[in-house]
Amino acid sequence: MSFQDDARAGTQAMRDVFPPTPLMRNDLLSERYDADIWLKREDLSPVRSYKLRGAFNAMRKVSEPGAIFVCASAGNHAQGVAYMCRHFGVHGVIFMPVTTPQQKIMKTKMFGGADVEVRLTGDYFDDTLASAQSYCADVGAHFLSPFDDEDVIEGQASVAVEIEDQLGRIPDRIILPVGGGGLSAGTRSYFGDKTAYTFAEPSGATSLGEAVRAGKPVDVSPINTFVDGAAVAKIGQRTFARLSTVDPADVLSISEDRICTTIIELLNVEGIVLEPAGALSIEALADVKDQIKGKTVVCIASGGNFDFERLPEVKERAQRYSGVKKYFILRLPQRPGALKDFLNILGPDDDIARFEYLKKSARNFGSVLIGIETTHPDNFARFFSELDAAGFTYTDITDDEMLVQFVI
């Protein structure tokens, strides 16, 4: 059987567990980009991500009685494996870092029920992975890789199978988020050269882009883990074997702050809750807008496991990227009326979001951390011009990541 036949067989078997996720045309995006834009809503799967597909396909092929399945994950893969352990009635041991948020631990336990044991070990994922693999060797368990496994890749290809069936044809372009490469490898292996591809990865973890340029998987550590569903330091060997010939121009690096603008817009305008990795493919539309006019495009919204405790950070990042919020350190004269002079410079659409004395830098001056929100980025041009005219000394630290981490 061909890969396509195997992927279709796996997809059919999945129908005993969960229905296809919706493929939904998005009018807002279609109008914006003058194209026919569809969203493959993996955020609406039983575990709010596509990860249960690969877990199901790999587990269904193990017929050994009393088999034990093991994985190492702090997120979607853990939940997908837990869900399938419960479905198959097999024992699963899921290793998670000690630093894993309680929300993710509780959801994993909820999906797995009595069939799953969660073990918290290691402060960092590498330590957790080593513990999981050591346990597998000791007890003869089956290790379920989140992406670097042929059966997992085949299972993730079920997303492509459903897209073709639901759309009634192969789209002109498909946009995918990339982490370890399982979803991308499965989709590209299924569609082959019958469509165009855009692979979007977070700028803090460009494992595919670097691998394509080097001609082999390379470790891009240290990585930024904000886009946790796609933050992988090294793409898989098996996944890269299926992606090694992609055009480097089709691999996009998208900043973490920029991704936040899509999360906020889809939440506020469309009522769609996406995790950062789930928003990657949609944000990538802006980079290919000249290539997709009049075309049919499918963006894979890979997951919606968003912890709403992160919403203030996501909003903050989105505002900074959009240019409507800035932080600066002001050298404020220590004289009566100095603060009033500064406040008079604020425009009708400018709001103070942060005001904090840091220290007196000299006898006659004090350093103040100030955050300003406004309604349009252009408002800052007038604001800074008037600051200069009034003789204020200030330093814009909005884009200084080191300082922002410490003071904001």
Image: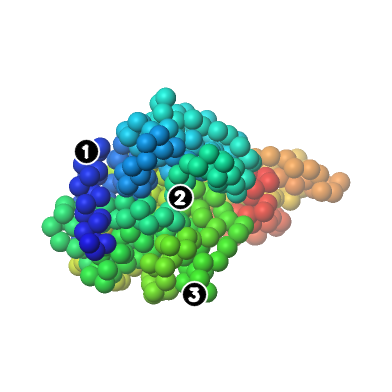
Disc sitting over residue 215 in the figure:
3
Residue drawn at point x = 33 percent, y = 42 percent: 63
The residue singled out by tag 1 in the image is: 16
Q: Would residue 151 appear left or right of 220 to someone viewing this image?
A: left
Residue lying furthest front: 65
Real-space Cα separation, disc 3 to disc 1, in angstroms: 40 Å
Q: How is the image coloured?
A: rainbow
Earlier residue among tags 1 and 2: 1
**Dividing the picture into quarters, in which one does residue 18 lie?**
top left
Residue drawn at point x = 40 percent, y = 47 percent: 263
| The one of 81 and 138 positioned closer to us in this rendering | 138
Task: Quadrant for the C terminus, please.
Answer: top right
Residue lying furthest left: 168
Disc sitting over residue 53 in the figure:
none
Q: Do tag 1 and tag 2 residues touch (Cβ < 8 Å)?
A: no
For mark 1, give the secondary structure. Answer: loop
Real-space Cα separation, disc 3 to disc 2, in angstroms: 23 Å
* In this rendering, the label closer to the viewer, 3 or 2: 2
Residue drawn at point x = 42 percent, y = 59 percent: 181
Residue drawn at point x = 67 percent, y = 54 percent: 402
Q: Do tag 3 and tag 2 residues touch (Cβ < 8 Å)?
A: no
The type of residue carrying mark 3 is Gly
The residue singled out by tag 2 in the image is: 145
Real-space Cα separation, disc 1 to disc 2, in angstroms: 23 Å
For mark 3, give the secondary structure. Answer: loop
Q: Position of residue 344 (x, y in %)?
A: 60, 45
